[in-house]
Amino acid sequence: MLTPGQAADSPQFVPVMDKIKVRGSVGRPRTRPDAAAGDKAYSSRANRAYLRRRGIKAVIPEKADQAANRKRKGRHGGRPVSHDPELYKQRNTAERCINRMKDWRGIAFRTDKTPDSYLAGLHLRGAMIWLRSLPTRP
């Protein structure tokens, strides 16, 4: 999903999740991943409710202010959110990939004039990263 550079990522969480396809070894791709990892920006109630409705495990830490509000409400504040720190560490792989994409100046500064040319740059940079990861022949 392409958005303006100044737009926040969190409102795009549901549209992005709706487009995800998880390939398996056989059959058609699944549209429901086992888990979704994100940073604290994605810890809204709406995002958590969406994941719960779809049966997807949320691997998103709780913001300090949200935890304080929950604790302030006492027993009416609900249960603390579950968080799997080991699964959360795997999010680092995606973050490093995004940073490698941003090594290309046109992607980092969003200098392309149209969404189509920006998306083409993302595809080209992704292909370059993938080709470099292939083993070299002797």
Image (spheres, grey):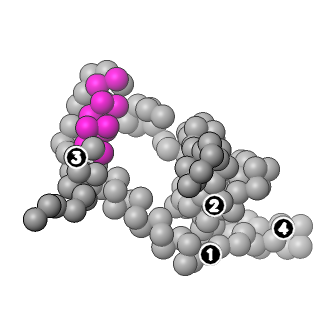
Across and down, in percent, residue 82 comes to: 71, 72
Q: Residues within 10 Å of mark 4 (few under 14, many from 20)?
A: few
**In front here: 138 or 76?**
138
| Residue shown at 40% from the left, 64% from the top | 93
Q: In the rendered image, which quarter is residue 57 located in?
A: bottom right
* Residue 43 in which image quadrant: bottom right
Q: Amino acid at mark 4?
A: Gly
Q: Position of residue 97 (x, y in %)?
A: 34, 56
User: Which percent across, then down, holds residue 37?
Assistant: 56, 61
Evaluate if marks 4 and 2 touch, with contact meaning CB atoms under 8 Å apart.
no
Where does the magenta region start and end? Answer: 116-126
Question: What main secondary structure does the magenta stretch of the protein show?
Answer: helix
Query: Which mark, residue 128?
Result: 3
First reached walking from the N terminus: tag 2 or tag 3:
2
Q: Are marks 4 and 3 in contact (CB under 8 Å)?
A: no
- Cα separation between marks 2 and 3: 28 Å
Tag 4 secondary structure: loop
Where disc 2 sits, the SS reads strand
> Mark 1 sits on what residue?
84
Pointer 2 or 1: first along the chain: 2
Q: Is residue 86 visible?
A: yes
Please name the residue that numbered disc 4 is placed on: 78
Q: Disc 3 marks which amino acid?
A: Met
In the image, what residue occupies the spot 43% across and 32% down?
2
Report how far apart the C-alphas of labels 3 and 1 lie in the structure.
33 Å
Question: Of marks 3 and 1, which one's residue comes earlier in the chain?
Answer: 1
Residue furthest bottom in the image:
86
Q: Is residue 94 above or below residue 29?
A: below
- Mark 3 or 1: the one toward you: 3
Q: Is residue 72 visible?
A: no
Q: CA distance from mark 4 to mark 2?
A: 22 Å
